[in-house]
Image (tube, helix red, strand yellow):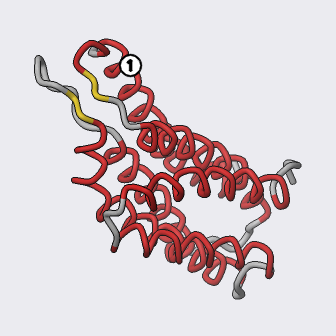
Amino acid sequence: MDEFSYLSVLLSIILGLAVTEILTGFRGLLQARGRVVLYWPSLLWCFTLLVIYAQTWWSMFGLRTQRDWSFAGFAVVLVHMILLYMQAGLVLPAMEAREQIDLRANYFAQHRWFFSLALLVVGVSLAKDLVLSGHLPDTTNLTFHGAFAVLAAAGVITRADWFHKIFAVLAAALMALYIGLLFMRLS
């Protein structure tokens, strides 16, 4: 077993737990559907996170060529996965036995933490490139990171419903474009 195959096991488990967290939330919403007050940006963020997790796993394949692993290199990738998992834990509320589930109320109760974690994900993603390769990603990749960071920072600051609705759609579109431009082929 090579180094990456060994290290990727823990990374895959954490990413799998993030996916499980969101899918469990969806299941809970279905089971409690009579008590759920929907807020579509929350649901769109769930789908966007699932796409982000798939893209993250897809892009991790590129790390297989990394031959000189250090604890710092592994730690930065591990922190990246942990932050993604933490976002999954905030996007939907815990499903209490008989309480009404208000997705809008949960969204705005969690938005500062959720988007703060998004900012950290962007920072750690850039740090990962620096630690593993010694340089920042290419201009296109860096532009997407920057755009998402600016939007996430605004998401931390504002409670304006219109902004969060636009941001949810824009984030999904940006992620689709990001994957389309940079990660369509497994390499």
Indicate the quadrant containing the C terminus: top left, top right, bottom left or bottom right.
Answer: bottom right
Q: Nearer the viewer, residue 67 or 94?
A: 94
- The residue drawn where x is 49% and y is 45% is 45
- The relative height of residue 137 versus residue 113 in the rendered view (above or below) is below
Give SS at disc 1: helix
Q: Position of residue 43 (x, y in %)?
A: 46, 36
User: In this view, which residue lies farthest toward the front?
Assistant: 162
At 62% from the left and 43% from the top, the residue drawn is: 51
Is 70 placed left or right of 182 in the picture? left
Choose between 37 and 64: the one closer to the eye. Answer: 37
**Mark 1 = which residue?**
27
Q: Is residue 134 left or right of residue 117?
A: right
Coordinates of residue 125 in the picture (x, y in percent)? 58, 71
Above or below residue 109? Residue 46 is: above
Q: How many marks?
A: 1
Answer above or below: position of 65 versus 19.
below
Q: Position of residue 110 (x, y in %)?
A: 27, 54
- Amino acid type at circle 1 is Arg
Spot occupied by residue 157 in the image (x, y as percentages of width and height)? 33, 74
Circle 1: is it few (<14), some (14-19), or many (20+) Cα within 10 Å? few
Task: Tell me the quarter of the picture where residue 96 sits.
Answer: top left
Between residues 122 and 12, which one lies in front from this camera angle?
122
Q: Residue furthest bottom?
A: 135
| Residue 37 position by quadrant | top left
Name the residue located 61 percent from the left edge and 81 percent from the top edge.
131
